[in-house]
Amino acid sequence: MTPTTTAAPTETPTPAAHPPPTPAPWSADPFAEAIRRGRGPLWLRRTDGHRYPLDVARWCAAPDAADRTLLHRCLHRGLPAIDLGCGPGRLVAELQAHGLPALGVDITRAAVIRTRGLGGSALCRSVFDPLPGEGRWGTALLADGNLGIGGDPGALLARAADLLGPSGHLLVEVEPEELEERITVAVEDGSGRRGPTFRWARLGAAATMREAVSRFALADSWASGGRSFLALERR
């Protein structure tokens, strides 16, 4: 006879306790709350203590004169436009109100909801996620400091180039002064509450062109309302 064996009893392990997931920057932090309210105060706080103001009230208002310099160039080209980091959607909604096909992309759900409430089309995604129309967009926008997304301007500019069709244009807002910073920051509200830290970048025109030169040629540069912009043509 084959001897019968009995398996040794095993003890069911107690599930390990896991800390709650860290909220993603911009999506579940003071930025999302400010977008829902339509106002700040709000800052990007660096790890060394320095901070930069975020102009939430302007982003949630109607396009101003500087914004209209971007909108005019999009409308003059008459080609479908994608706004990378569209925020509360004032640019996308204005372009669509003038009959131009446009799409906003933002990781903050509150921003996407607000964009749609203005009548604009928007997706809640990272700019590095798969997006509709890759390689066919006529114009891409990086306004309101969004050149800093991801803390790697070279990678972001390469991604923008991949989204554009041949001879597509990237309209990018740069810092008014000549600087090049790659920094770690967190969003901070008026009560001192902060979201998680993340990588960011701030570049002036010359530094932007150094990062862009392999993918883009400079087509135009201008300033309006204390803000500075470049129009880059895809090579």
Image (cartoon, rainbow, N blue to C red):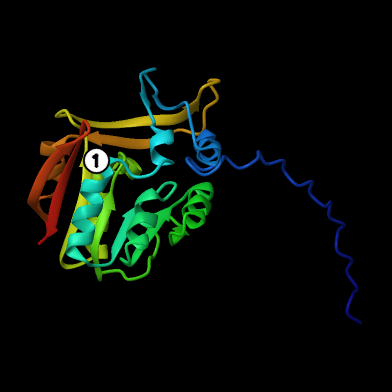
Q: Secondary structure at mark 1?
A: helix
Report the front residue among 178 and 171: 171
Q: Is residue 88 above or below residue 204?
A: below
Residue 47 in sight: yes
Q: Which quadrant holds residue 17?
A: top right
Q: Residue at x 51, y 43 (%)?
A: 24
Q: Which quadrant holds residue 50?
A: top left
Q: Residue at x 75, y 47 (%)?
A: 15
Q: Amino acid at mark 1?
A: Ala
Q: Position of residue 94 (x, y in %)?
A: 35, 55
Residue 154 in sight: no
Q: Residue at x 23, y 60 (%)?
A: 75
Indicate left or right for 122 with 52 as reference: right
Q: Is residue 144 above or below residue 1?
A: above
Q: Position of residue 198 (x, y in %)?
A: 41, 36
- In this figure, which residue is indicated by the disc labeled 1? 66
> Which quarter of the figure is the N terminus placed in?
bottom right
Q: Is residue 84 above or below residue 24?
A: below
Q: Which quadrant holds residue 72?
A: bottom left
Q: Position of residue 118 (x, y in %)?
A: 47, 54
> Which quarter of the figure is the C terminus placed in?
bottom left
Circle 1 crowding by C-alpha within 10 Å: few under 14, some 14–19, many from 20 = some
